[in-house]
Amino acid sequence: MNSKPLDYTALVITIIGAVNWGLIGFFKFNLVTFLFGDMTLISRIIYAVVGICGLYLISMFGRVGNGTD
């Protein structure tokens, strides 16, 4: 099974989440809250998707070390 598209999608979503955390840390500005409201259903879904992508990317450690796709 070729999981490269899923890997890249998860990576992009996780990077966007990391940028949001950087904005929170440096400027006290939460982009998700600004765009979608404070803990609305859509913002909670966004946080959940970012978290799931981060957990999925843990599997990349084993695949990168083995050199397999």
Image (tube, rainbow, N blue to C red):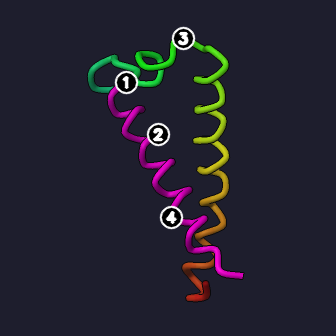
The residue beneath circle 3 is: 38
- Which amino acid does the dot numbered 3 rest on? Asp
Given contact means CB atoms under 8 Å apart, are the residues at marks 4 and 2 in contact? Answer: no
Given contact means CB atoms under 8 Å apart, are the residues at marks 4 and 1 in contact? Answer: no
Q: Is residue 19 left or right of residue 11?
A: left
The residue beneath circle 1 is: 24
Location of residue 23 by image quarter: top left
Disc 2 secondary structure class: helix
Q: Report the mark closest to the observer, 4 or 1.
A: 4
Disc 3 secondary structure class: loop
Q: Quick one: label 4 or label 2, which is nearer the N terminus? A: 4
The residue beneath circle 2 is: 17
Q: Quadrant of the N terminus?
A: bottom right
Q: Quick one: label 2 or label 1, which is nearer the N terminus? A: 2
Location of residue 27 by image quarter: top left
Disc 1 secondary structure class: helix
What is the spatial separation of the Cα atoms under label 4 and label 2, in whole angstroms? Answer: 14 Å
- Which amino acid does the dot numbered 1 rest on? Ile
> Which residue appears farthest toward the left when viewing the image?
27
Q: Which mark is residue 8?
A: 4
Percent position of residue 40, x then y: 62, 14
Question: How many other residues sit within 10 Å of disc 4, few (<14), some (14-19) or many (≥20)?
Answer: few
Q: Quick one: label 2 or label 3, which is nearer the N terminus? A: 2
User: Which range of residues does the magenta coloring cover?
Assistant: 1-23
> Which residue appears farthest toward the right when viewing the image?
1
Prevailing secondary structure of the magenta residues: helix
Percent position of residue 33, x then y: 47, 17
Given contact means CB atoms under 8 Å apart, are the residues at marks 3 and 1 in contact? Answer: no
Residue lying at 59% horizontally and 32% vertically, measured from the top left = 47
